Image: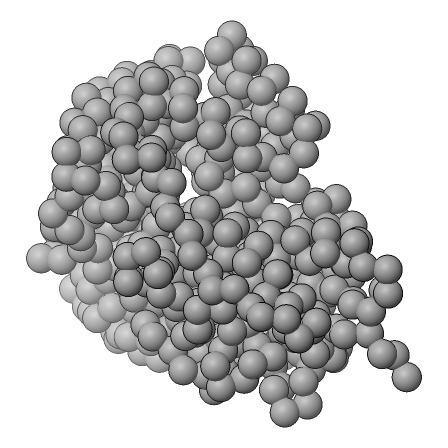
Amino acid sequence: MDSKTRILILGGGFGGIYTAMELSKSIARRASGDIEISMVNKENYTVYTPMLGEVISGSLSPLDVSIAIRDLCPRINLFVQGVEHIDFDRKVVITSINSSSVKNEIPYDHLVLALGLEDNFSIVRGLSDHGFHFKNVADALILRYHIIAMLEQADTETDTAKRRRMLTFVVAGGGFSGVEAIGEMNDYVRGTARRYNNIKDDDIKMILLHGYERILPEFPPSLSDYAYNILKKKKIDIRLNVFIEAVTDDGAVLKGSTVIPTKTVVATIGGAPGAVLKALPLKKERGRIIVNQYLAVSELPDIWALGDCAYIMDNNTNKPCPPTAQFAVREGKRLAHNIIAEIDNRPKQPFSFKDLGMMSALGHHSAAGVVLGFKVSGLIGWMMWRFVYWSKLPGTVRKIRVAFDWILDFVVPPDIVNINLDPTENISKMHFEPGEMIFNEGDPGDKVFVILSGDAEVLKGTTQNPIGVLTIGDCFGEGALMYDKPRSASVRTVTAVDVLTVERKAFKALFTNVPVLREAFESIIYKRKDIA
């Protein structure tokens, strides 16, 4: 029987990685080899998120901010899998590879929960269908290539309304992530737009939406005001006390029914616990797992938690620790020592850390922050921001790569190559608000629609009189694809509508190769000739 104590870490963010790194150092000093460390993470790398915004602008390569977990923690067993369920009674974690039906059980003696939070896109209608995430490298790359695609299309678009929509970029959320994202996007879009013959700087709109009275609320008011003024000078339209209610393919709907025509909405509106965390029978505060001063769950002493998913009181302020990288790093180090102390029957130490400060980049050559109680801003703040985060990058090779890319960024224009990252599958979801056109009579047929929720009406002719109603389960738009002809009618939503869409290529493959489906669609068209 294996007598090793098994420590299992769930999550490869700052908290999980620094717990694993500190544990690795501890077991390297032990001659007994009595501890085994494992980690479960969906990717085999961790993301250095403070520099993620620079991937959008191309200042840094995706590989500059992605660090292989095996290089950081060579003594751990890494399971590149997703967490499905935690069984406290049996002391096992059930995982799967790419959400497949094949499950794996990983036993543990001590379990570290560092799963973080997930984007809470469900709070805004249509956001999950049309909004852009900004949490990992893939998100930053997809956003970057989408921005380039919008510039390419706008450069040759003759319809003024469509062109303005393509050149309007919206970021929802005025915290650190939102401010840094809009700053990098603004620099990149305005800088690269000079290389397009038909796009002028005044054509571009950058809009930051924030639901409270000032951006960067973690800052002192004077620094928040400074950041606000800097972004305004960079031609960024900042709208305070504004909440986004819905997102469609063509716009952002604000509270009060104001619509911003846009093809780009980036959401940095905070996170929520994932399904695994929600299902855990543990005490929580605002969705985060409550832990004691030793970072342990009081009701289950072999369960530990840290980072964004944990509710930890700060001994210095008597307030909950903020979900920031510098706190997660220190929590990870303290938690690792406390687990070892628990194994060795030694006293554990309470977590205590004094915030060293916080900084936010505002685009190239400007930043704002508080460091060791002193306010910094402008060019000096930006240089300090870069140095601080550069110095904390793990690994000498990574530091050299980042420094070299920053040097090149001063002398080489930004890259505008657009690599298509669209998924190969051709089935997706779309959201429409009441009164929106799903398609117009005469439009080319590009996809088939199935209504998942809501109601729509079919319109015909120049008078646009309703000739039919579509509701949940109804399929429409297939005729134009089957017979390669323009849409024979328009479809407009009556209520908020969610639809499932099947792109032309996928539909053609199904229609051609599945006789039952072909017969079903032909029957639909025969009965409903006007809805194509």
Q: Quadrant of the N terminus?
A: bottom right
- The image position of residue 123, as x and y in percent, is 29, 66
Instruction: Return the residue found at the far bottom.
Output: 89
Q: Residue at left 15%, top 51%? A: 212
Image quadrant holding the C terminus, namely bottom left
The reply, left or right, for residue 393 in relation to residue 251 is right
Quarter location, residue 303: bottom right
Q: Who is closer to the viewer here, 188 or 201?
A: 188
- In the rendered view, tell whether residue 215 sits above or below residue 388: below
User: Residue 508: which quarter of the image?
Assistant: bottom right
Question: Is there any visible trace of residue 228 in the rendered image?
Answer: no
Q: Residue 86: percent from the left, percent from the top?
A: 60, 81
Residue 215, placed above or below residue 101:
above
The one of 251 and 222 positioned closer to us in this rendering: 222
Query: What residue do we see at 23% from left, 41% from top?
Result: 219
Q: Residue at x 24, y 22 (%)?
A: 234
User: Picture coordinates of residue 29 (x, y %)?
Assistant: 79, 54
